[in-house]
Amino acid sequence: MPIITLSTTLAMASAAAIINIWLAVRIGAVRRAYKVSVGHGGNEAVERRMRAQLNFVEYTSFVLILIALIELSGRGGLWLNVVGGVYMLGRVAHGVGMDGTGPLAVGRMVGTLTSMLITLGLAIAAALIAARVI
């Protein structure tokens, strides 16, 4: 039985795990700074960082599944690596932008648009592959 290596999926899952840990560490930092041990404690900074991580998990699960299925279909390639990389960069921008202040706040919009457009694009690609259009 041949071994199937999903290189793109493995790379993106690895990046996602690292980003998720980074987002969790950022939550811990504001929890310590504002002495909030459970939940957000009514603190907007803690709530923003918690939402950034939850939003990451909400989108990334679908993106990783779509990447894996497209790769399994044999329709992956360099384009899928680029799309996955752009998605991960957008998620970092979103995490920073969720702090909501200064010029980095634009990262929230960039990350949101990147996530939505890439998720939609991957979903359309997967549907076209399933319909044997591409």
Image: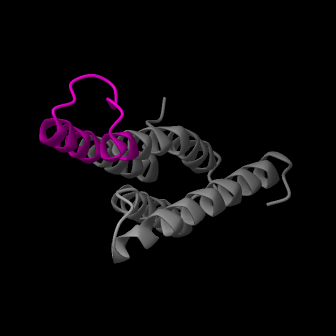
- Is 42 magenta? The answer is yes
Which residue is more in the foreground, 40 or 107? Answer: 40
Which residue is more in the foreground, 79 or 63? Answer: 63
Q: Residue at x 33, y 51 (%)?
A: 15
- Is 53 magenta? The answer is no
Which residue is more in the foreground, 73 or 108? Answer: 108
The colour scheme of the drawn protein is: one colour
How many marks are shown on the rendered structure? 0
Which residue is more in the foreground, 38 or 41? Answer: 41
Place of residue 4 in the rendered image (x, y in percent of width and height, measured from the top left) = 47, 39
Please identify the dominant SS of the magenta region: helix
Q: Quarter of the image holding residue 134?
A: bottom right
Tell me: 128 left or right of 92.
right
Residue 22 vs 24, above or below: the answer is below
Place of residue 58 in the rendered image (x, y in percent of width and height, measured from the top left) = 53, 38
Q: Which residues are magenta?
A: 22-48
Place of residue 35 in the rendered image (x, y in percent of width and height, measured from the top left) = 15, 32
Q: Quarter of the image holding residue 124?
A: bottom right
| Residue lying furthest top | 38
Q: Residue at x 36, y 59 (%)?
A: 92
Q: Residue at x 42, y 43 (%)?
A: 5
Place of residue 45 in the rendered image (x, y in percent of width and height, measured from the top left) = 31, 47
Q: Residue at x 22, y 30 (%)?
A: 36
| Residue lying furthest bottom | 103
